[in-house]
Image: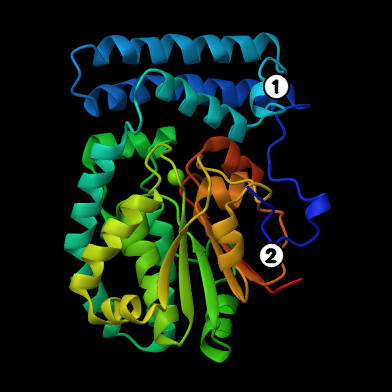
Amino acid sequence: MTVFPLLAEPDRYRPMMIDLVDDAVARDYWLDVFANHLPSLADHCIESDSGADAAERAELVRERFSAMIAALRSDPRAYDERVGPISILGICRLREQVMREQGFADPYQPIKQRENEAALQLLPALLDELDGLDDRPRLEVVVTGIAAGNLFDLGAAGSYEKYRQGGFDFHATRDKAARPWRVDDVDALIDRLLNRPPTRAMLLVDNAGADLVLGMLPLARELLARGAQVILAANTTPSLNDIIIDELGEVLGLARQLDPYLDQACDEGALACVASGNDVPLIDFRQISEEMASASAGVDLLVVEGMGRALESNYDARFTCDTLKIGMIKEGWVAQIFDAELYDVICRFEPKT
Ligand code: MG
């Protein structure tokens, strides 16, 4: 693992927006968030595992992770040696470790697969819709689609409950994601894409399903059409419903069969995938794969997508190339930080520093 070469001032970089070390109120709040999420996690463990003892092992996950949360409540430094000073990222990592210890390698695999298949069915009509629009309105719809797709997040209580009750309706979500957003640099982003298209873009993708297929792939396609090389960077190992590198390859293999542009871009090597080395829904840019570091050479547009990667971590991070940070807010504390409402969108475009 290595430091991301595009990080400006890596010595001053701090990945986390939310300080759980010194802020006891934040710490209690987030430990509650993790505790409240645990029942749904156990359900997904059972769903993903056909073993006869899956329910018992899922119960062990629940017990052991509950015990960790309790330990952190009484001693925030309880797991410093294991995952560093207490942070949302570190607690996510503990959660993954507990599941793996009980044999649950990828509890959200069935749901990711279902959502990937459902989103791929919608992709051709979406691309037709986009291709019928002029440049500026099309790019606006593409960016709004990224925000809408990002609602498919099974780590946040609000979006999980929405999903449980009615599934995920990409078009309805997109219609509701009306601008202006809480932070809305969409016009500046579109100006950049139209007037000075990037030559090489790296897109850090977040969730499976609509998030990737109907949000980020159409952006990749836009960039490709303007002559950019595009690298999609995905987590290496499973974490909630985040897409991982192996699934990304599979989804791209199916998507290219649906769209000649994507197909050609894959053939020509203009569109490629890279494993980020990451293992959680947030990202620490001091710990990324050598492969992603190498692939970042020459990148002049970085897209960091998702509430975890772009808002809970890295919102203050500065990079040496133009950067888009975009995500939908699905968590009360995050909404409060941005003085926003739940399901508002943050779209921050920053010229390089
Ligand atoms: Mg995610």
Where residue 108 appears, as percent x and y from the top left, is: 31, 36
Between 119 and 333, the one lying in front of the other is 119
Residue drawn 41% across and 62% down? 146
Q: Quadrant of the C terminus?
A: bottom right
Kind of residue indicated by mark 2 = Leu
Residue 265 lies, with reference to residue 118, above or below; the image says below
Give the class, few, some or many, for how many residues have Cα within 10 Å of label 1's Cα (few <14, many ≥20). Answer: few
Where residue 344 appears, as percent x and y from the top left, is: 49, 52
Give the class, few, some or many, for how many residues have Cα within 10 Å of label 2's Cα (few <14, many ≥20). Answer: many
Secondary structure of the residue carrying tag 2 is loop
What color scheme is it?
Answer: rainbow
Residue drawn 60% across and 67% down? 296
Residue on which disc 2 sits: 6
Secondary structure of the residue carrying tag 1 is helix
Looking at the rendering, which quadrant does residue 299 occupy? bottom right
Kind of residue indicated by mark 1 = Glu
Residue 37 lies, with reference to residue 262, above or below; the image says above
Residue on which disc 1 sits: 81
- The reply to whether residue 345 is visible in this rendering is no
- The reply to whether residue 117 is visible in this rendering is yes
